[in-house]
Amino acid sequence: MKCFLSISLLLGLAPAAFAQSVALPKSQWFAPAPRPHVTFVETTPAPNPGSVEVRGFGLDLVTGARVNGAEVPILAQNRGRLVLDVPPQIPGFGELELLQPQSFQRARIEFTPSLAGRYDAGAARVQLRLNPGHPGWYLVNFSFQARNEMLVFPGAYYGEMLDMDSPYSGVLFSGLMTGEPMVFPWFDMPRVIIGVGDLGITWGRPGSFFGTTRPLRIQALCGGGDLCYSNMLTLQATL
């Protein structure tokens, strides 16, 4: 009888104990680890980025940082701000990673001169944005042929990736700049039509052609401060 009563009492207590365990607040079971949040990354020149400021929330949780896959030193740090020591980079848009023991946070970092673009396939138009990073002059070149190897000129940072000796190359825009980002007007998409023979460059939407189009490649050269090439854009037009 004692054995039976003991088992009955044990069975009676087990559901109550289990009910107490599932009644715990969910936050005690699934509390997410705090993570940093980035709201701002300073734009900086590719030849000499130096100290780059990052702003946001929870940045005191960051234990390390990488730019384009390479670790960079943290010079200063608090809850809302980081200062990173970044070495020279390739112009354009790179990736910033803020590290924690079990995770990381990604953000974009811009190295000037940087070139971005968008293509309106319906209207066969292109619009470009150039951020030179300093006052001076600029050339925005295009070519339907990229070089096999980048051409580096003395005194220039980075190099020319377009084959400007090709007959299918030229200048899209040129002029003076204040150093602030510039958005150029929409322009018709230049293209080379390859079919029976090479039909040359057309602008905008062609009529009736057979064949395919070569990718359009665009790169800027900025002077007045550091003489520096931008990243290269590649746009694929459609017939």
Image (tube, grey):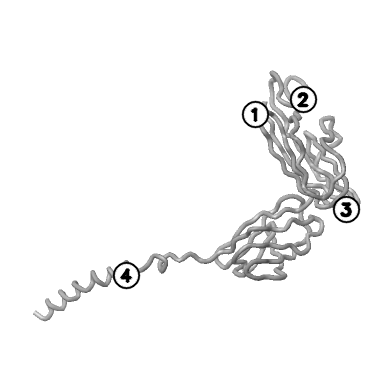
Spatial CA span between label 4 and label 1: 60 Å
Q: Give the numbered dot on residue 225.
A: 3
Q: Secondary structure at mark 4?
A: helix
Gap in angstroms between the C-alphas marked 4 and 3: 67 Å
Residue 117, image x and y in percent? 71, 40
* Residue 104, disc: none
Q: Residue 122 shows which numbered tag?
A: 1
Q: Which residue is mark 4?
A: 21
- Marks 3 and 2 close (CB-CB < 8 Å): no
Q: Are marks 2 and 4 in contact (CB under 8 Å)?
A: no
* Quadrant housing the C terminus: top right
Q: Would you call the spot at circle 4 few (<14 residues within 10 Å), some (14-19), or many (20 or more)? A: few
Q: Are there few (<14), some (14-19), or many (20+) residues within 10 Å of tag 2?
A: some
Q: In the figure, is residue 121 to the left or right of 160?
A: left
Give the mark nearer the N terminus: 4 vs 3.
Answer: 4
Label 1 or label 3, whichever comes before in sequence order: 1
Displayed quadrant of residue 215? top right
Q: Is residue 183 left or right of residue 95?
A: right
> CA gap, disc 2 to disc 4?
73 Å
Name the foreground residue: 182 vs 107.
182
Near-viewer residue (118 or 209): 118
* Amino acid type for the residue under numbered disc 2: Thr
Q: Give residue 202's mark.
A: 2
Between marks 1 and 2 in the image, the one whose residue lies nearer the viewer:
1
Say which label, 2 or 4, has the lower sequence index. 4
Circle 3 packing at 10 Å, graded few (<14), some (14-19), many (20+), is few
Task: Name the kind of residue labelled 4 in the image.
Answer: Ser
Amino acid type, residue under disc 3 in the picture: Gly
Is 208 on the left or on the right of 3, as rendered?
right
Dot 1 or dot 2, earlier in sequence = 1
Mark toward the viewer: 3 or 2? 3
